[in-house]
Image (cartoon, rainbow, N blue to C red):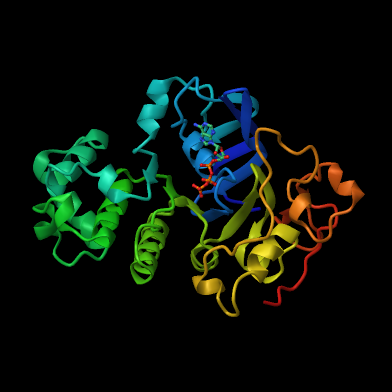
Amino acid sequence: MTAARKVLDIRDLTIEFPVYGGAVRALDGITLSVGAGEIVGIVGESGCGKSVTAMLSLRLLPDGRYRVLNGDISLLGHDVLAAPEADLARLRGGQAAMVFQEPLTALNPTRRIGRQMIEVIRRHRPIDQAGARALAIRLLGDMRIADPAEVLERYPFELSGGMRQRVLIALAFSSDPAIVIADEPTTALDVTVQRQVMSLLRRRARQSNAAILFITHDMGLVSQYTDRVYVMYAGRVVETGATGSVLAAPAHPYTRALLQGLPDHAVAKAMLPAIPGNVPDLRHPPAGCGFAGRCAHAVARCSERPPLAPLDGEEGREAACWFASIQDHAP
Ligand SMILES: Nc1ncnc2c1ncn2[C@@H]1O[C@H](COP(=O)(O)OP(=O)(O)OP(=O)(O)O)[C@@H](O)[C@H]1O
């Protein structure tokens, strides 16, 4: 675990979505933190709870649609689950910014980029129109956009997907955020552009010591761009630690399965492989290990839930498996 001040701190959070005839246990006791200046990834298969974690960190899920059964979330010292909506509204897009997958839906298609940027900038800073325009140009320049003044005159549809995402990242940093929550920010882009955008995002975050919580199902991006990683499975964190060591020596059978399914040398460019078997039905969350049904090593004890527990030998390495051990990963 990092010694840096925690910007986001989620503790033992369990939430449910009421659905017809029952409830979906989307998060089941997750604990996760992001320190100042850290880039932290959350990786896992579809439906494991990544987006719900990102959205709830800013309380972006509609009130009344979910129930918190346990736990809390602290974001920049605010108690996210209890804070007045006005406090959270100030944080969002200010000290805590967001970048989502599809930049076209985040930008207003009928207004020029410049007008939109200036408006957002002035919402968080007491500067005049000319000052905001100058700042917009500087922010676009930081994102290596060659002719920022010209881009300000364009409409969103006149830019490529990669350029639009750069504009949104520039905007996210316009309020000098302490943390940026990026949910699959490059998934809609092709592979080369994905990496350019990720490099720019990381570079920009390092410049201002901003933290990033990066949600992805791409192990390659995790390996290249994050300092620490949380591997999620069926609403739980199953493994966490410094990215280099988790990927080099995964301790949880699920993490190993994710990595073993990747072709040789592919960690740098691979999406998650298909693992045989099905994820548990979250309307009936498993009492024991959620991965037991797909795990080649499962034994009777796995019907008891393994806690996320520290592993010997390395600070910050934790895994939720009765038989967790740090093993070298041989692809
Ligand atoms: N509003 C909702 N009502 C009921 N269930 C929901 C709701 N939102 C999410 N879920 C369920 O919560 C679980 C976690 O969803 P989440 O979107 O966080 O997954 P994810 O890991 O981000 O997946 P993906 O990679 O596909 O985006 C899933 O089982 C999903 O079906």
**On the image, which quarter does residue 208 sit in?**
bottom left
Q: Position of residue 134 (x, y in %)?
A: 14, 51
Residue 282 placement, left or right of 60: right
Q: Residue furthest bottom?
A: 264
Q: Position of residue 79 (x, y in %)?
A: 54, 27
Can residue 252 be seen here? The reply is: no
Q: Position of residue 328 (x, y in %)?
A: 74, 73
| Of the pair 169 and 22, the residue shown nearer to us | 22
Q: Name above or below for residue 314 compared with residue 269.
A: above
Residue occupying the point 9% across, 45% down: 130
Residue occupying the point 57% across, 25% down: 19
Q: Residue furthest right?
A: 300
Q: Position of residue 33 (x, y in %)?
A: 59, 45
**On the image, which quarter does residue 282 sit in?**
top right
Residue 144 placement, left or right of 38: left
Q: Name above or below for residue 91 compared with residue 305.
A: above
| Of the pair 7 and 284, the residue shown nearer to us | 284
Quadrant of the image containing the C terminus: bottom right
Residue 309 placement, left or right of 232: right
Can residue 84 be seen here? The reply is: yes
Report the label total.
Answer: 0
Q: Name above or below for residue 222 compared with residue 13.
A: below
| Of the pair 299 and 176, the residue shown nearer to us | 299
